Amino acid sequence: MAQIRSKQIADFLTSVNWGTVKGGDIIGGAVLSSEFSTEKAARIAGDETLSTDLSTEVIDRGLAVSTEAYVRSVADATLSTNLSSEAVTRSTADATLSTNLSSEEVTRSTADATLTANLSTEAYVRSVADKNLNDRVDSVLANIDPEALDSLTEVVSAFQLADGDLLASISTVLYEHNIDWDSLSIAVRGEISDRIAGDQTISANLSTELVARATADGVISANLSAEVVARTNADAALAEDLSIAISAEHEHHVDGDAALSAEFSLAILAEHSEHLSAEQVISANLSSELVARAAADATISANLSAEVVARTNADAALAEELSLAISAEHEHHVDGDAALSAEFSLAILAEHSEHLSAEQVISANLSTELVARATADDAISANLSTELVARSNADATLTANLSTEAYVRSTADLNLNNRIDSVLANIDPEALDSLTEVVSAFQLADGDLLASISTVLYEHDTDWSNLSIEVRGEISDRITGDQTISAGLSTELVARAAADTALSTAVSTAMWNEHVEHLGNEQAISANLSSELVARAAADTALSTAVSTAMWNEHVEHLGNEQVISANLSTELVDRAAADAALSAAISAEVDARIAGDTYAEEIVTGLVAEAGPLPVNTVGEFKMSADTEVYVNGLRVEFTQNGTTDFELNLVYALEASDKVMFVGVVA
């Protein structure tokens, strides 16, 4: 068998021209090179695809976070605008109500001043009328002479008749006066009662409105607090769920990487063991062949041992390279997971911080609005209380003035009745019996007295009618003013209720939109995370498949390599012979170079002064024009042109001084 194997090797060596053999002529060499190149390209493409997918995922996550931040800022700006609009609307409504109250105060003050002026005018007119009436009575009394009226009995009957008419007229006047005064007193008392009832109704309505306002503000504040708590809990739950999902994904990747690394290590160890076994078998076979071959076989055995060492080193290098690649890929996955987890955590923290800031701003704005509302309500309540006090004081003053006027009127009427009674009492019918000239004077005086009474009654009726019209006008103005205040207050209550409803609706809508957006973002994050998990699983599967394929291809290649080791060994022998020939040629060239180096010479030139640029220099010794010639200035090589054995042109990049040393080195010509 050894002789047959030796004959096959000898025939193979004589049939191959080792001087022109190529890598493609080796059995399996081209296939091995092609498959290795394909695997290398596939591995590079897979890494680039994984890097691109991860970059795309990071960009998508950044865009999602930026979009969420933008949507949140727009929603916060909208909510802030709505709160600002509500504050402006409330401020305008409060200003309108305050203006209406101020206008009502001015109107009431003007009406009170008018009523007071009318009462003062009435008192003045009454005092003037009373004075005129007293003057007339005094005139009547002055024209009566009791001592002259003692004999005219017919005058007595005429006087008594006139006296009866006068009493009837006076009684009629007093009766009408008392009826009108009672009517005026009843109307004024009714007006006072209506004023007090209206003020009490306004106060009760305002108290009810203040209670309703405080209740509604408490409900809004409680709802907002509940929404803030719900938002905080939802954010915390979302952060916890996302952290758990990321941790689970990270653990899954770590476990997968560890399992994959263990699987790869076992496969590599098995492959390495198979290789060692195969190499040991080959070594034993080759050792048997070397024993049969003698000296030539000893050379082949040495070369084969070298090849075995090279193969072992190559296998070790391949195993190390694959281990490094697996470690790098694992670190890449771990770093990617850590970066993605950190990015998600930062995004969630930023989102949570923005939500907290927005909720704090909303809470602060709402607190400010509640304080402003309470302040405005207190101001309205104080103004209305002041108005009620002013109304009560004005009503009390009016009542006092009316009471004073009634007392003055009754006193004046009593004095007038006393004067009339005095006039009646001072007439003695028995004394009127002798002065006939008194008859015409009496008749004339009687006519003047009737005319005066008629005039007084006319003036009294006119003044009373004017006063009644003014009082009724004041009553009508008061009723109209009360109706205006009640209508304004009702409108304000309706506006307040509508504004509160609108505010509650706006806050509820904003909270609902916020909740819907959070749900959408959580679903989007969950979907993206699921997609990332699927993509990671697919990438791990693809990586595992690629590595398994690579290992199988490597195994197949090794089997092929083992089959062609003999051919490669023959090629190695040819390459060794060619390398030995090349080495021999190189040694010869080196010997020639060493011999030439023995004729190297150096020459140092000093005292040269020149600026940067070309500088011609001639040497004393002659140097061969070859690549071995060099020029140095102070130990630094400079560019130069050699025009002859002693003719050089230096290309200086800096100025040359006399102390500088220019050294020429080369082979002696």
Image: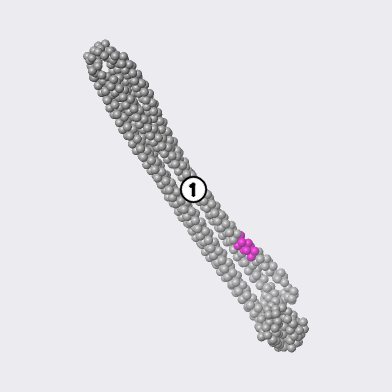
Q: Is 468 in the magenta? A: no
> How is the structure coloured here?
one colour
Query: Which percent across, then down, holds residue 617?
Result: 74, 84
Q: Is residue 190 visible?
A: no
Does residue 111 appear anywhere in the picture? yes
The residue type indicated by label 1 comes to: Ser
Give the vertical position of 486 relative to 268 (above or below).
Answer: above
Q: Is residue 106 shown above or below 321?
A: above
- 381 vs 136: above or below: below
The magenta segment: 40-50
Q: Position of residue 149 (x, y in %)?
A: 25, 15
Residue nearer the viewer, 604 or 60: 604
Number of residues whose C-alpha sits closer than 10 Å to that of mark 1, classed few (under 14), some (14–19) or many (20 or more): some
Q: Is residue 43 magenta?
A: yes
318 vs 266, nearest the viewer: 318
- Image quadrant of residue 186? top left
Residue 57 percent across, percent down from the top left: 57, 57
In the foreground, 261 or 214? 214
Quadrant occupied by the N terminus? bottom right
Q: Residue at x 49, y 60 (%)?
A: 251
> Is residue 449 rendered to the left or right of residue 247?
left
Residue on which disc 1 sits: 80
Q: Does dot 1 land on a helix, a strand or a loop?
A: helix
Relative placement, left or right, of 516 versus 280 is left
Quadrant of residue 386 in the image? top left
